Amino acid sequence: MLRGHSGPQANGVDTPVRDDPKYDTKRAKKKLRYYVESHRHAIRLKAEIMVDHFHEQVIDRKLVGGEARAMVVTGGVERAIKVG
């Protein structure tokens, strides 16, 4: 152990966040999910997956006779603008 270091217990670092009432885990998860889903790389990957799925499951199987259309549903207008 380092000299003069009393360990994490002295600073309260060992206390789990889930037990601390000043942290709202539901709100934190919502903000984290929004941040991750708004990231350009995540949006690009999701769009790529959706397009690939549409091609493989609809167009390649000739299910729509050349008259294919698709709709992407987002969580709001701001997200739709980022995806589009």
Image (spheres, rainbow, N blue to C red):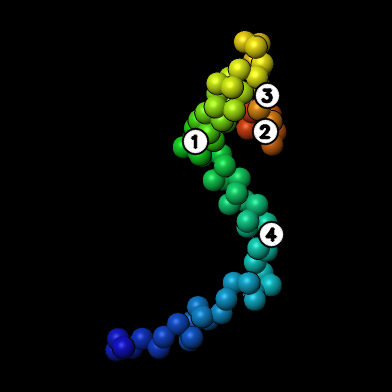
Image x and y of residue 1, in percent: 31, 88
Q: Amino acid at mark 1?
A: Leu
Mark seen at residue 26: 4
Image x and y of residue 55, in percent: 55, 23
Of badges 2 and 1, nearer the viewer stands: 1
Q: Which residue is mark 3?
A: 71
Q: Amino acid at mark 2?
A: Thr
Q: Earlier in the sequence, mark 2 or mark 1?
A: 1
Mark seen at residue 7: none
Q: Amino acid at mark 3?
A: Met
Q: Earlier in the sequence, mark 4 or mark 2?
A: 4
Q: Is residue 44 left or right of residue 4?
A: right
Contact between labelled residues 1 and 2, with CB atoms less than 8 Å apart: no
Q: Nearer the viewer, residue 12 or 27?
A: 27
Q: Which residue is mark 1?
A: 45
Q: Residue at x 59, y 72 (%)?
A: 17
Q: Is residue 78 visible?
A: no
Q: Which residue is mark 2?
A: 74
Q: Earlier in the sequence, mark 4 or mark 1?
A: 4
Q: Earlier in the sequence, mark 4 or mark 3?
A: 4
Of badges 4 and 1, nearer the viewer stands: 1
Q: CA distance from mark 4 to mark 1?
A: 26 Å
